């Protein structure tokens, strides 16, 4: 509801010309799916044989072309919004909208081409995709704000870890009431 409120405010629309939607867009054989790793435990990390990277095991989600990959009915992109798909490489789980090697999305190049200097990050989930996108935004030199009341975490422990990482990266946490003040 808060994201919808922000997007429909005339002041918001007048001030911010670009809106990006990032989405997981996974192939069915994605490395993060617990179903693809017999003997693994849901929500527990494993080390991927192919890459040596530690990976949390998630339920199958956001599989390309399925209902589970659709945007929420109350948060649909408009014709002028930009959709960035991530997690398309089966070998890497790109939490960040900027991607994770070997996958790199078009987000950074597009933001730079449009002259964007500030990012306001919202959505799901605070402790994974939202936080990782905000951290990468700050690393790439954007003044980055995470709108804390427009996101939710998966779990309290990972939310605490992400909060520390965000502070360390220089990301500023704000509420939606502060968006138009900054």
Image (spheres, rainbow, N blue to C red):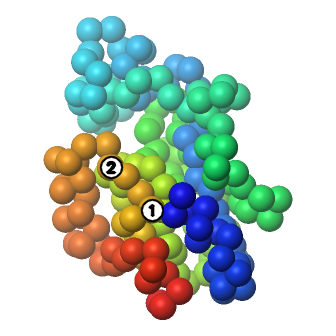
Residue 27 is drawn in which quadrant?
A: top right
- Number of on-image labels: 2
Residue 163 is drawn in which quadrant?
A: bottom left
Helix, strand or loop at label 2? It is loop
* Mark 1 residue crowding within 10 angstroms, few (<14) / some (14–19) / many (20+): many
Where residue 32 appears, as percent x and y from the top left, is: 40, 29
The label on residue 136 is none
**Is residue 153 visible in this depiction of the protein?**
yes
* Mark 2 residue crowding within 10 angstroms, few (<14) / some (14–19) / many (20+): many
**Is residue 52 visible in this depiction of the protein?**
no
Figure check: 99 above or below 49 = below
Q: Could you tell me which residue is drawn at 29 percent across and 72 percent down?
A: 169
Cα distance, mark 1 to mark 2?
11 Å
Discs 1, 2 touching: Cβ within 8 Å: no
Q: Could you tell me which residue is drawn at 25 percent across and 57 percent down?
A: 162
Q: Furthest-top residue in view? A: 38
Where residue 113 appears, as percent x and y from the top left, is: 69, 76
Where residue 133 appears, as percent x and y from the top left, is: 44, 60
Q: Residue beneath label 1, please? A: 150
Figure check: 118 above or below 109 = below
Helix, strand or loop at label 1? It is strand
Q: Residue beneath label 2, please? A: 153
Quadrant showing the N terminus: bottom right
């Amino acid at each position: 509801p808060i994201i919808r409120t922000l997007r429909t405010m005339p002041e918001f629309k007048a001030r911010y010309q670009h809106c990006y939607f990032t989405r997981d867009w996974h192939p069915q054989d994605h490395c993060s799916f617990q179903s693809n790793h017999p003997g693994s435990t849901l929500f527990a990390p494993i080390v991927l044989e192919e890459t040596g990277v530690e990976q949390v095991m998630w339920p199958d989600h956001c599989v390309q072309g399925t209902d589970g990959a659709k945007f929420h009915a109350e948060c649909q992109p408009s014709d002028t919004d930009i959709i960035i798909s991530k997690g398309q490489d089966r070998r890497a789980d790109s939490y960040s909208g900027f991607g994770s090697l070997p996958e790199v999305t078009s987000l950074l190049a597009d933001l730079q081409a449009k002259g964007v200097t500030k990012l306001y990050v919202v959505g799901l989930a605070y402790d994974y995709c939202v936080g990782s996108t905000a951290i990468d935004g700050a690393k790439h030199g954007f003044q980055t704000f995470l709108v804390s009341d427009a996101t939710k975490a998966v779990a309290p422990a990972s939310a605490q870890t992400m909060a520390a990482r965000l502070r360390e990266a220089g990301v500023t946490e704000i509420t939606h009431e502060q968006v138009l003040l900054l």
